[in-house]
Amino acid sequence: MATPAAELDLPFYEGRDVEQMTALPDGHWLARNFFGYAVWHYDDAVGILRDKRWHNAAGRIPELMGITNEEFLSRQGISILSAEGDMHTRLRRLVAPAFSPRSADRLRPFMREVISGLVDNVSAAGRADFATDICEPYPIPIICELLGAPKSDWQLFSRWANDVLEIFSLDVVDKLDLIMRTQDELDAYTRELIAERRSKPADDLLTDLIAQEEAGDKLSTDELVMMVNAVIVGGTDTTRNQLGCAVNLFAQHPEQWAMLAEQPELAQRAVEESMRHFGAVRGTARFASVDIEYKDILFPAGTFMAVGLDEANHDATVFHQPGVFDITAQKGDQPQLTFGSGIHYCLGQALARAELQEALPLLAQRMPNLRLDGATTWKPDGVGIFGPAHMPVTFDAGH
Ligand code: HEM
């Protein structure tokens, strides 16, 4: 008979601390935390994320943060970011083709153009706040291009993205009015864009999503609108913070930065290794949709489980010398987990990988001798996404 989790004598896990968790004696694989429990070994992280009975806690975050607004809560329900079961499977099946590596690849020349333009702004000075000058603006034009929104609307998107992303802030309850107002504006805009694409198809994600049809099933306009919202929520802050984390690492490993400039073919390795070593999404959470027995322990329905992706990415049983950042080494056979695992595995991974693979070697070539120039200010390590808020750097000017 499985032992109920509540009866176990477990260590308490206060926050994200790779060293604290990976230093626990062998055999420890479960801890208690503020909301429920936590796992951090690679096999447990993957085991939980691949078990469909553990539901995504994203949909429960607003509720946990004290939001009671019915309209807001019901809107989140149809988003792929929080949907579960048949609804999730259906949404995922309908939208997956539009997020294929091939769709991402067609944006690669545009990605290079955007990153080059951003470097042009700071190149002569030989110094920049990498977080605000490069990371912050990078994903917006790409998301706009992906969706097929005109260039004249980039500023608008940038503001919408910032406001909608307040959903991840710790004072989300106070920001609810702003978030809902922005969602309304974005809704109205997207509906217009959808109507336009229905009558005049183009070479963009929205047209692909509209055209996606399987066995007579199609996304409704409401679902299309929520998809656009999910792309903005899932695709902007993640990418910009991941770029910041990666470049922060490279600034401390100048020999690998120089190597990447000389051998741009290392881009793919550079992206995987920086996401493994310093991922912008350091953990996620699930709750038990039914009573679940796992490793002879019973987790009753409703139990919350934090999944430490960062810790799993440093699991010494899976990755060779996990504490060492090295873009030339083959660290192991398993993938890094910063895009998650299982049915909620990042839908935008091909796009995100392409964005980072295009940006990093180009930056390494145009910002040689990149160094940190003073302290980096980090975003608060709260719900969701981590990265630099300010990151002063110097580099050789004029490249
Ligand atoms: C480096 C950048 C990115 C990182 C680190 C990242 C990370 C993640 C992770 C960890 C998940 C799974 C969350 C969970 O299981 O709890 C996820 C899901 C998702 N991501 Fe990303 N992501 C990135 C970029 C993007 C981009 C560019 C897009 C869209 C264009 C996107 C859209 C989504 C969506 C829609 C989901 C939900 C998928 C589902 O639940 O079926 N992401 N992402």
Image: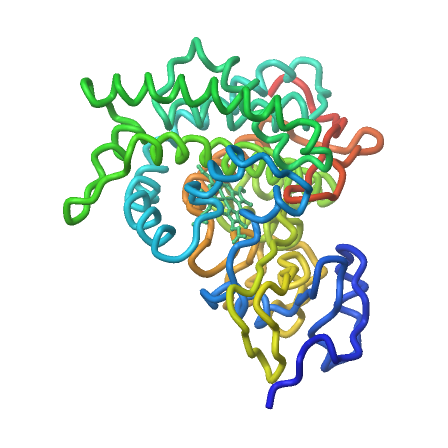
Task: Residue 313: name its quadrant.
Answer: bottom right
341 and 352: which is toward the camera: 341
Q: Is residue 125 left or right of residue 284?
A: right
What x and y, as percent, mark residue 371? Answer: 75, 33
- Residue at (55, 57) in percent of width and height: 337
Decide: is 158 above or below 354: above
141 and 306: which is toward the camera: 306
- Residue at (54, 73) in percent of width and height: 291
Q: Residue furthest top?
A: 152
What x and y, as percent, mark residue 104? Answer: 36, 37
Location of the C terminus (image quadrant):
top right
What x and y, as percent, mark residue 121? Answer: 61, 13
- Residue at (45, 61) in percent of width and height: 342
Q: How many marks?
A: 0
- Residue at (57, 59) in percent of width and height: 286
Q: Residue furthest right?
A: 374
Colouring: rainbow
Q: Residue furthest left?
A: 216
What x and y, as percent, mark residue 205? Answer: 32, 31
Location of the N terminus (image quadrant):
bottom right
Q: Is residue 250 left or right of residue 191?
A: right
Task: Residue 94: name its quadrant.
Answer: top left
